Amino acid sequence: MFVIVHFGERQSEILNPNCRIVSFVHYLKEQCKVDPHECVDLLDTTGELANLSEREPSLELACSVLRDRHSYVLIRVTRAEGVTGCKYEPLLRDLDKTHPALAERLKRWSKPHKDRERKGGVSRKGGLQKDIATPHGTRAPSTPGSKRGTNDPIRR
């Protein structure tokens, strides 16, 4: 069993996910030369987030979350205080050229939402807000009539 992780200047690593998530993430950071204190995650080429950063403290094996022989893009996850959601930054250069749909998805996910806005109040346009799922299971606001792409399901 293996997975391929893409990062940097079109670099890739083949990794064995048959270990605990914490060990896998530690080794991943080591191999990809990422600061050990940074929070990272993997995004597959269909736009599905692995959510390794949330599952890291568990005893789960990485192979239970990642698909065998599948390709992933390494991303940095930054959580800001006072804002719901996270900022996602690809650690693969030129993602917008190699995978434009993934780059666009990360940009949409990275738009911060203040706590007071997400509780379903009135939007700036005067309408009530509905909730839409974001990658980490938190809820983000949208106005009625806003359109979501049909290829935008959030999977866990």
Image: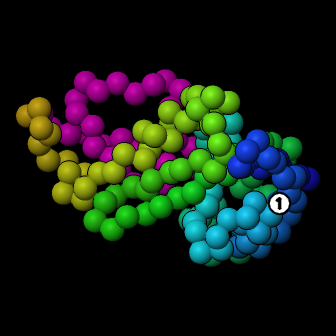
Q: Please tell me which residue lies in front, 97 or 79.
A: 97
- Whole-percent x, y for residue 124 in the image: 12, 38
As drawn, which residue projects farthest toward the left?
Answer: 126
Query: To which residue does mark 1 refer?
Result: 17
SS category of the residue bearing label 1: loop
Question: Residue at 8% across / 34% down in the picture?
Answer: 126
Disc 1 residue type? Answer: Pro
Q: Is residue 61 left or right of residue 79?
A: right
Classed neighbour count for the residue bearing mark 1: other residues with Cα under 10 Å, few (<14), some (14–19), many (≥20): many
Residue 110 percent coordinates (x, y): 42, 47
Q: Could you say which quadrant of the image residue 57 lies in?
A: bottom right
Task: Write the start and end of the magenta stretch as one range.
Answer: 127-156
Is residue 153 one of those drawn in magenta?
yes
Residue sitting farthest toward the right: 1
Q: In the image, 40: left or right of 116?
A: right
In magenta stretch: residue 132: yes
The spot of residue 71 in percent (x, y) is 77, 42
Instruction: Assign the magenta stretch its main secondary structure.
Output: loop
Residue name at image x 53 percent, y 26 percent? 151
